[in-house]
Amino acid sequence: MSLLGGRMLTLNAMSIEAWPSLIPRGLVLSPTQLQRGGEEAARDLLGCYLLSTIGGAVVGGKIVETEAYLGSRDPASHAAERIGRTTRNAPMFGPAGTAYVYFIYGMHWCLNVVTGKEGDPQAVLVRAIEPEFGCEVIRRRRRRDRDLTNGPARLCQALGINRSLNGHRFGQDPLFLIGGDPTGTEQIGISGRIGVRRAHDWPLRFFLRGHADVSDGKAAEPALQAILP
C-alpha cells in the first residue's frame, strides 16, 4: 500500500483531473531508472504500477509478469541485427521510457517499455498486471469477469492501449509507470519466453511466483547456456 503513501485505494473514486497531482513526482519512473537494459529493467518493473487515463478512466494495476528483449543481439527481438531499424520498430531506438506498441495476429496490441540507452533497442514486454484500479471499466472493455489482464493482449484491451500510444513517453497522460515496493529475488520466477520461435528458451521471462494474474501461456525451459553479452 505504499504507492500513494496510504492513499492508493482512493484512485478508483478520483476524477481524472485530480488524481495525477496526488502522485509524488519521485514515484513516476524516470528514463534514467528505466535505461538499465532489458533484463535488469524486466526484473525491476515487477511490482511497479502501470496506470492508464485513456477514455477518462483511471485504470491499471501492479505489473506481475514481464519479458525482456535485448536488441540487436537478440534473435527474437523486433530489432534483431538481421532486421535493423524499420518504421515499425523505430520507437525501440528512442530513449528509455518510450512506449513501443505493436500489432500481432491481425487482432491484438502489445505494450513494451523501451529500456536501453538511445540507439540501443532493448525493451520489456509487459505481459500481465494485477487489475486494481478501474475494474468496472476493465470488465466492460474485456466483456467478461475473469482473465482480465493476464496476458499482453488482454492488458492492452483492458487499459485501452492501441497504436496511438506507439512512441508515447511514460510519465505523462495517458500512460504512467509508477514505482512500487521492491520485489525480493525469492518472489521472482524465471522461464523461457512465450510465443517466439527464436531464442524462446532464453531465461528472460520474469513473473511473481504463484500470482493469480500471471499469464498461462506455455513457456520454454530456460536455456542452459548463458545469454551472449
Image: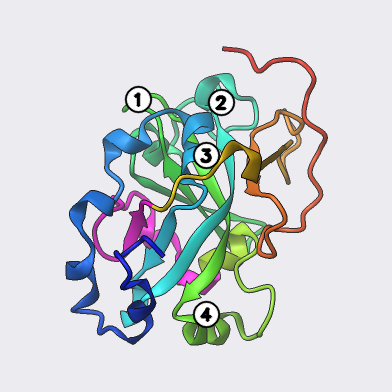
Q: Report, in whole angstroms, how far the alpha carbon at label 1 lies from the one at label 4.
A: 35 Å
Name the element at disc 2: loop
Q: Position of residue 155 (x, y in %)?
A: 55, 65
Name which of mark 1 and mark 4 comes first in the sequence. Answer: 1
Q: Which residue carries the number 4 mark?
A: 138
Q: Report, in whole angstroms, how far the alpha carbon at label 4 lies from the one at label 3.
A: 24 Å
Residue at 69% over, 50% down: 209
Tag 4 near tag 2, CB within 8 Å: no
Whether residue 75 is visible to the viewer of this picture, yes or no, is yes
Q: Report, in whole angstroms, how far the alpha carbon at label 2 lies from the one at label 3.
A: 18 Å
Name which of mark 4 and mark 2 comes first in the sequence. Answer: 2
Residue at 64% over, 39% down: 186
Q: Which residue carries the number 2 mark?
A: 80
Whether residue 95 is visible to the viewer of this picture, yes or no, is no
Q: Report, in whole angstroms, how far the alpha carbon at label 1 lies from the one at label 3.
A: 19 Å
Q: Which residue carries the number 3 mark?
A: 42
Label 3 is placed on what type of residue? Ala
Q: Nearer the viewer, mark 1 or mark 3?
A: 3
Is residue 41 shown above or below 229?
below
Could you classify mark 4 by the number of other residues whose Cα lies within 10 Å: few (under 14), some (14-19), or many (20 or more)?
many
Q: Nearer the viewer, mark 2 or mark 3?
A: 3
Q: Is residue 140 left or right of 176 when viewed as pictured?
A: right
Q: Position of residue 140 (x, y in %)?
A: 54, 87
Label 2 is placed on what type of residue? Ala
Looking at this rendering, what residue extends furthest in the top direction? 229
Q: Which mark is residue 148?
A: none
Q: Report, in whole angstroms, how far the alpha carbon at label 4 lies from the one at label 2.
A: 34 Å
Residue range corresponding to the magenta coloring: 157-179
Q: Position of residue 141 (x, y in %)?
A: 53, 82
Name which of mark 4 and mark 3 comes first in the sequence. Answer: 3
Residue at 44% over, 80% down: 134
Label 1 is placed on what type of residue? Gly
